[in-house]
Amino acid sequence: MDSKKLDIARNRKGFIAALDQSGGSTPKALRLYGIDEDKYSSEDEMFKLVHEMRTRIIKAPSFNKDHILGAILFEQTIDREIDGMKTADYLWNKLEILPFVKVDQGLADLDNGVQLMKEMTKLDSLLERAKERGIFGTKMRSVIKEFDCVGIKEVVKQQFDYAKKIIAKGFVPIIEPEVDIHAEYKGEIEKILLNELKENIEKLAKDDFIMLKLTLPEEDNLYLPLYDYENVLRIVALSGGYTREESNERLGRNHRVVASFSRALTEGAKASMTDEEFNKHMEESINSIYKESIK
């Protein structure tokens, strides 16, 4: 593993931009951007439009290494180009921003109060492509919706089982066991999750490095003890449906946790904006998220 990239992942100030909307969430992302379904007639056209949106974000002047330490990409994005360069190459070689790729294939049906990840039948081939594309790490998401100890344990076990396979291929996995922000007993769920994370981290080998992407907790700094483990390079937070204002407010109360926002990052950005308007909007968004990520 590249020592410079590991140092950035562990120590650089800034946050991770989540630009990994997949097939299921892309229409919503485009709607929020001001592009309705009647503006495209095929999946190819849809993904072309969302890549144009992502390209516009990445090329905004404020999207730079002084604010952003990494960006999570959708699988198709790693095969697309920005200014003649593969997206990951553009991020690393031009901007010195770490590229990650979303590797999960979506969520299974609700069982035991959670949605596990579907079996990752394409993981090996995707990791081979990711290696060719210069990807640094991966991200995979499951969701905890109810207070169910069995389900929470299953979520964390599955995440770490896949994480070990990903580490063995030379990547740093971002483990994302999201807690639904509307879950009843959310605070109690998070305490059980913390204990499960500790148990699984303790089983990792010395040089098995991971990052954790977690819902902003009800108890401030709940997850801070996870930094006691050298394996944990960084704890990042998802916005999970909170507005950018609330996400930032909660983020600022959780020390050493940095943002990995998707919807909150792009909130209010529109395709109809001029480049000047768009860049100004992104600058305000990025600066506000960065400010709370360095507390």
Image (cartoon, rainbow, N blue to C red):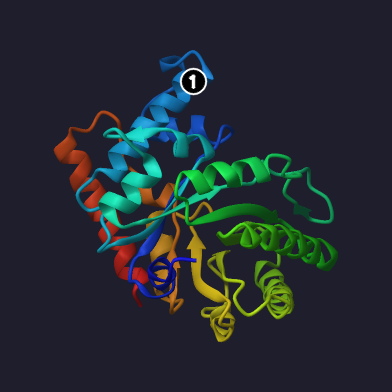
The percent coordinates of residue 157 (x first, y second) are 77, 64
Q: Tell me which residue sits at (29%, 33%) in the image.
A: 84
Q: What residue type is labelled 1?
A: Asp
Task: Between residue 128 and residue 188, name the one nearer to us.
Answer: 128
Is residue 199 positioned above or below 15 on the image? below
Residue 124 picture quarter = top right
The answer to whether residue 88 is left or right of residue 112 is: left
Crowding around mark 1 (Cα neighbors within 10 Å: few <14, some 14 to 19, many 20+) is few
Q: Which residue is drawn at 69% across and 73% down?
A: 197
Q: Quadrant of residue 245?
A: bottom left
The residue under the point 72% across, 44% down is 120
Q: Where is residue 243 in the image (x, y as percent from the top left)?
A: 43, 54
Residue 177 in sight: no
Q: Looking at the image, can residue 60 be seen?
A: yes
Residue marked by disc 1: 44
Taking depth in this image into account, of 274 and 147 the one nearest to the observer is: 274
SS for dot 1: helix
